[in-house]
Amino acid sequence: MPIKNQAPKQSSKKHYENISFETLATSWLLNDGWEVYEPKIDHGMKTDLLIADGQKYYRIQIKTLESNNEDVVVQNMWGDANIDFVIYFSKHDNWGYLAKPFPQRSKPLKSEDHIRFHKHPKPFAKAFEAI
């Protein structure tokens, strides 16, 4: 059995954790039949994932929340970048939200136009179809 001999630095651990949610979304989208592309760098363009249905492309931003409380206000971290969807994942609970990007600086996560999903492929796919 492999043994991990060195724990990652705290700054690295946070990066690995965030990447793991991008990988999770990638897996679920691939499983649902989407083509998924991962930009090498997303600075400036604010695109974590690019997905396609064979004809049209969509840009996605993935955000993680350090809270298990859904009554939080989320920030516009993409500015005026031309993205299509934002996927929020709770790091500490089994839920997430799908949203269209919003122009204002902040917005309640539980806004009427945001779609909640249980952190599992089937509820995620159902929510993604509804957005």
Image (spheres, grey):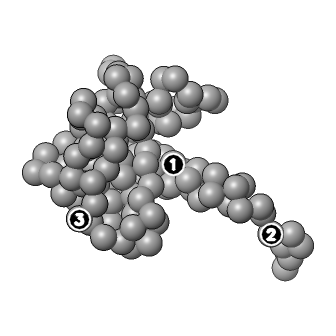
Q: Residue furthest left?
A: 112
Residue at image mark 3: 71
Residue 22: assigned label: 1
Crowding at mark 1 (Cα within 10 Å: few <14, some 14-19, many 20+): many
Mark closer to the chain start, 2 or 1 = 2
- Residue 109, image x, y percentages: 24, 54
Which amino acid lies under the numbered mark 3 shown in the image of this protein?
Asp
Q: In which quarter of the image is the N terminus?
A: bottom right
- Residue 6, image x, y percentages: 86, 69
Q: Which residue is drawn at 19% across and 42% down?
A: 131
- The secondary element bearing badge 1 is classed as helix
- The secondary element bearing badge 3 is classed as loop
* Residue 118, visible in the rendered structure: no
Tell which of 117 and 121 is nearer to you: 117
Tell which of 5 and 13 is nearer to you: 13
Residue at image mark 2: 7
Which amino acid lies under the numbered mark 1 shown in the image of this protein?
Glu
Mark closer to the chain start, 2 or 3 = 2
Which amino acid lies under the numbered mark 2 shown in the image of this protein?
Ala
Q: What's the CA distance linking mark 3 and mark 1?
A: 23 Å
Crowding at mark 3 (Cα within 10 Å: few <14, some 14-19, many 20+): few
Mark closer to the chain start, 3 or 1 = 1
- Residue 121, image x, y percentages: 36, 60
Q: In which quarter of the image is residue 81?
A: top left
- Give the mark toward the camera: 2 or 3: 3
Tell me: residue 79, above or below residue 99: above
